[in-house]
Amino acid sequence: MNDSIRLFELAGADDEIRFSPYCWRTRLALAHKGLNFKTIAWRFTEKEAIAASGQDKVPVLVIGERWLHDSWDIAVHLEDHFPQGPSLFGCSQGRATARFVSQWTNDVLQPAIARIIAPDMPAILHEKDRAYFRTTREIRFGCSLETLASERQKALTALHQILTPMRAVLGKQSFLAGDAPAYVDHCVFGAFQWANIINSLPLIEPDDPMFAWSERMLDAYGGIARSAKRCHA
Ligand SMILES: N[C@@H](CCC(=O)N[C@@H](CS)C(=O)NCC(=O)O)C(=O)O
C-alpha cells in the first residue's frame, strides 16, 4: 500500500462495505493504472473530513498534498499524471467517448438502478447517515422510499430497456472498451457493483450477455471487485 495516495470512499455501517458507484470507478481506475493506494471509510454526514477538497462528495483522492474530487476529473488526472500505467481512455477520441459514457452513467443508468435499490440502503448505512439519506433521496426521487419499493418491478423493466444497446454490444465483444476493460467499463460496472455490494435484487440474469461481462469485471485487476465485502442477504 502506498500511503501517499488516499481514497475517501463511502462506507456503510460496516467500514468495509464500500458501495458507492462513483468510488468504484476511481478504485478500478487506480487498479487499472497499477497504483497502490490506501482507502479511508467516509460517511455521508462526515462533510468536514473532505472539506479540503472544496466540496462535499466522494470520491476524493489525495495524492501527496493535492486533493482531487469528481470521478471524471480524477480519471483524467490519473491518465495525465501516470502515463506509465495502462491507458484509461486509449486515445483522444476514446477520452471524449468515455466522457459521454461517464455522463450517461450519471444521468441515465445510475438513476435507473437507484430506483430499484435505494429502498435497501437505509438498512446498511451507519445510523448517523440514515435520516440524511432518506431526506435527500426522497427529495431527489419525489416520493418515499416505500413508494419506490412498491414500484420495483416497473423500475426493473425500465432498466432492462435502458440496457438494450449495451447488451447488444457485450454480446459481440468482451468489454465495452474492446478486448480488455478500460474506463468506460469502470463507469458502467461501478453502478452494478453498487447493487452487488448491498446485495440487492439481481439486476441481470445469467442468460444476459451483460452477466458474462459483469463476471469478467468482477475478476479483473486481481479480482478486487469480487473480493470486496458484501452485505448479507
Ligand atoms: N459528480 C460526482 C458525484 C459524486 C457523488 O454523487 N458521490 C456520492 C456518493 S455515490 C456522494 O458523495 N454523495 C454525498 C451526498 O449525497 O451528500 C463524481 O462523479 O464524483
Image (cartoon, grey):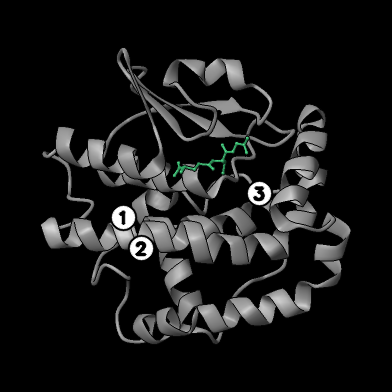
Whether residues under marks 2 and 1 lie with C-beta atoms below 8 angstroms apart, the answer is yes
Circle 2 SS class: helix
Callout 1 amino acid = Tyr
**Residue topped by disc 2:** 101
Callout 3 amino acid = Arg
Q: Which mark is residue 230?
A: 3
Residue at horizontal 63 percent and vertical 72 percent from the top: 203
- Viewer-nearest of labels 2 and 1? 2
Circle 1 SS class: helix
Circle 3 SS class: loop
The alpha-carbon separation of the residues under discs 2 and 1 comes to 9 Å
Q: Position of residue 229 (x, y in %)?
A: 62, 44
Toward the viewer: 80 or 30? 80
Query: In terms of sequence position, does the residue under pointer 1 or pointer 3 come before the other?
Result: 1
Q: Which mark is residue 195?
A: none
Q: Which mark is residue 183?
A: 1
Look at the image and tell me whether residue 81 can be seen.
yes
Describe residue 91's horizontal placement relative to residue 68 as left or right.
left
Whether residues under marks 3 and 2 lie with C-beta atoms below 8 angstroms apart, the answer is no
- Viewer-nearest of labels 3 and 2? 2
Q: Categorize mark 3 by other alpha carbons within 10 Å: few (<14), some (14-19), many (20+).
A: some
The alpha-carbon separation of the residues under discs 3 and 2 comes to 26 Å
Query: In terms of sequence position, does the residue under pointer 3 or pointer 2 come before the other?
Result: 2
The alpha-carbon separation of the residues under discs 1 and 3 comes to 23 Å
